[in-house]
Image (cartoon, rainbow, N blue to C red):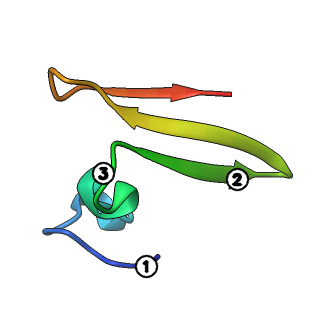
Amino acid sequence: MTGDSGQASDDKPRYSARELTGSGQTAEIVLDGQIYTLRITRSGKLILTK
């Protein structure tokens, strides 16, 4: 996903957590073959776990 959600500062990519998780509360992110889970909590905070 390369979507930009709003103006990024310092030309850094910016992604919407809501777009990443789609209609759910979690998304998987892969880095160097490792899978991480991004989760939106009930209170609207983000948790990234391996």
- Above or below, 47 against 23 in this view is above
Can I make out residue 14 in this image? Answer: no
Q: Earlier in the sequence, mark 1 or mark 3?
A: 1
Residue 42 image position (x, y, % from top left):
19, 24
**Which residue is painted at 17% across and 29% down in the image?**
44
Kind of residue indicated by mark 2? Val
Where is residue 33 shown, x and y percent of the image? 86, 52
Element class at badge 1: loop
Please tell me how crowded label 1 is: few (under 14), some (14-19), or many (20+) other residues with Cα within 10 Å.
few
Residue 23: % across, % down: 28, 59
Query: Do the CB atoms of the residues marked 2 and 3 lie less than 8 Å apart?
Result: no
Query: Is the C-beta separation of discs 1 and 3 under 8 Å?
Result: no
Give amino acid for label 3.
Ala
What residue is disc 3 on?
A: 17
Q: Secondary structure at mark 2?
A: strand
Q: Secondary structure at mark 3?
A: helix
Judge whether residue 25 can be spotted in this image: yes
Observer-nearest of 33 and 9: 33
Q: Mark 3 or mark 2, which is nearer the start of the sequence?
A: 3
Residue 30 numbered tag: 2
Which of the labelled discs sits on residue 21, or is there none?
none
**Residue at the disc numbered 1:** 2
Give the CA separation, mark 1 to mark 2: 15 Å
Q: Report the side of 18 relative to 1 (left or right).
A: left
> In this rendering, which labeled residue sits more in front, label 1 or label 3?
3
Residue 5, above or below 27: below
* Mark pair 2, 3: CA separation: 15 Å
Residue at point 65% right, 39% down? 36
Look at the numbered discs 1 and 2 and tell me whether their residues touch, using CB distance below 8 Å.
Answer: no
Neighbor class of circle 2 (other Cα within 10 Å; few <14, some 14-19, many 20+) is: few
